[in-house]
């Protein structure tokens, strides 16, 4: 709210946004290595049975399935088991809203005062 706070946010964003883009670029470059290896393996094993287009379609489908499982379905299951008042849809909604950076703040994990190991849980949620 202060003038200094606004100036700090602007400077932080001028540095932070390009650094985030650099980090994402480096991350994608590293993730492409196993993705290419998987596609090449699928080509070797299935190339004599299926067309190249179909193998690439299977590869993309498998990548999407793995991504959805590791970033949405599994974390939602964990939140569902740890949050006493959430159903699975609430947990999935929280994961989706958080990871798409919409972040409405209507669901906050670890807000229950009777949450076991609450400080550790809050730190682990921050890392998610």
Image: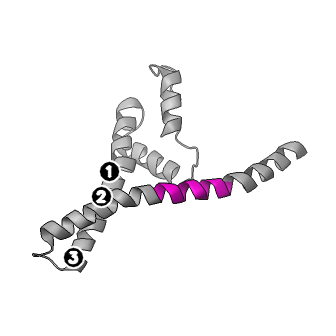
Report the residue marked by disc 1. 69
Q: Are marks 1 and 3 in contact (CB under 8 Å)?
A: no
Report the residue marked by disc 3. 54
Q: CA distance from mark 1 to mark 3?
A: 22 Å
Q: Is residue 12 visible?
A: yes
Residue occupying image coordinates x 38% and y 49%: 72
Q: Secondary structure at mark 1?
A: helix
Q: Are marks 2 and 3 in contact (CB under 8 Å)?
A: no
Q: Is residue 119 magenta?
A: no
Pick the residue in front: 37 or 51.
37
Q: CA distance from mark 2 to mark 3?
A: 16 Å
Dominant secondary structure of the magenta stretch? helix
* Residue furthest left as drawn: 49
Residue occupying image coordinates x 16% and y 68%: 44
Query: Of the residues under marks 2 and 3, which one precedes in the sequence?
Result: 3
Q: Are marks 2 and 1 in contact (CB under 8 Å)?
A: yes
> Horizontal and vertical percent for residue 64?
33, 61
Q: Is residue 25 magenta?
A: yes
Relative side of 72 to 117, left or right: left
Q: Residue 18, located in which quarter of the rendered image?
A: bottom right
Q: Secondary structure at mark 2?
A: helix
> Horizontal and vertical percent for residue 95?
45, 47
- What range is drawn magenta here? 17-28
Report the residue marked by disc 2. 65
Q: Of circles 2 and 3, which is in front?
A: 3
Residue occupying image coordinates x 32% and y 50%: 69
Q: Is residue 57 above or below residue 70?
A: below
Q: CA distance from mark 2 to mark 1?
A: 6 Å
Q: Of circles 1 and 3, which is in front?
A: 3
Q: Is residue 2 visible?
A: no
């Amino acid at each position: 709210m202060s003038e200094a706070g606004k100036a700090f946010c602007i400077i932080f964003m001028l540095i932070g946004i390009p650094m985030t883009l650099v980090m994402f670029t480096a991350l994608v470059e590293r993730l492409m290595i196993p993705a290419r290896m998987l596609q090449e393996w699928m080509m070797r094993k299935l190339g004599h049975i299926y067309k190249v287009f179909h193998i690439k379609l299977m590869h993309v489908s498998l990548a999407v399935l793995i991504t959805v499982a590791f970033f949405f379905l599994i974390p939602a299951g964990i939140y569902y088991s740890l949050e006493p008042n959430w159903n699975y849809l609430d947990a999935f909604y929280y994961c989706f809203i958080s990871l798409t950076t919409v972040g409405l703040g209507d669901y906050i994990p670890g807000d229950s005062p009777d949450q076991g190991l609450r400080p550790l849980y809050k730190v682990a949620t921050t890392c998610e």
